[in-house]
Image: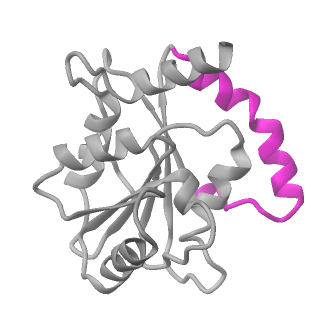
Amino acid sequence: TLFAVLTRLKQICNFDRASGDSCKLDALRSIVDSAQPSDKILVFSQFVESIEWISERLDAFPVDIYHGGQTLEERDAVISRFEASAGPRMLLISLRAGGVGLNLESASTVVLFDRWWNPAVETQAVFRAHRFSRTTPLYVVRFLVADTGGLTFAAEDDLARQIQAQAGMAISEADVIILVVDAAAGLTPFDRE
């Protein structure tokens, strides 16, 4: 089906199974390299395979994984460890398991590693860290791979985001960074200033 083909293309944009290459992982490493000692980073992906793959490649950075295949006790322990630990720290979360019902205010950065079909789901994921009581900026990074359907989908969901804004769901544009990842052009270091 067309849906299966598009899903497979989205997975290929995350990483190439044959070579292990990933321009998104390179961009994530740039964010990790610029992390402050107190930073906590949430990385959302719709694919559990992707978050497990990422965790295996960021061995020098404290990383936890949260997904629906874990027991409730395991997921609770992961969240408690993330919230209680000093930074820097990263929590890799499957979008379906962690998109609602979590309160992760200690996060300083949210990375949407791949796009979800419904932009409202992405917004809910970001709201896990963006709370009314928040007093510090929250940096939101959406990875889009150049010359793929991801950029097309991003342009098409502008209308959905406008509707969310009218409903009072939008996050300040100052908090949102859209990082277009282009493997051929190289990467620009993540700069939050």
Display coloring: one colour
Q: Give percent across and percent down for residue 138.
A: 50, 67
When asked about the image quadrant of residue 69, the answer is bottom left
The residue lying at 10 percent from left, 56 percent from top is 60
When asked about the image quadrant of residue 186, the answer is top left
Give the quadrant of the C terminus.
bottom left
- 153 relative to 22 in the view: left or right: right
Residue found at the very far left of the displayed protein: 60
When asked about the image quadrant of residue 87, the answer is bottom left
- 47 relative to 116 in the view: left or right: left
The residue lying at 57 percent from left, 69 percent from top is 128
Front residue of 111/189: it is 111
Give the quadrant of the N terminus.
top right
Q: Is residue 157 part of the magenta span, yes or no?
A: yes
The residue lying at 74 percent from left, 35 percent from top is 157
In the picture shown, does residue 145 fall above or below 131?
above
Classified by dominant secondary structure, the portion drawn in magenta counts as helix
User: In this picture, which residue range is highlighted in magenta?
Assistant: 148-174
- 142 relative to 54 in the view: left or right: right
Q: Give percent across and percent down for residue 57.
A: 17, 43
Q: Is residue 149 part of the magenta span, yes or no?
A: yes
In the picture shown, does residue 2 fall above or below 34?
above
Q: Give percent across and percent down for residue 192.
A: 39, 57
Q: Give percent across and percent down for residue 15.
A: 33, 27
**Mark count:** 0
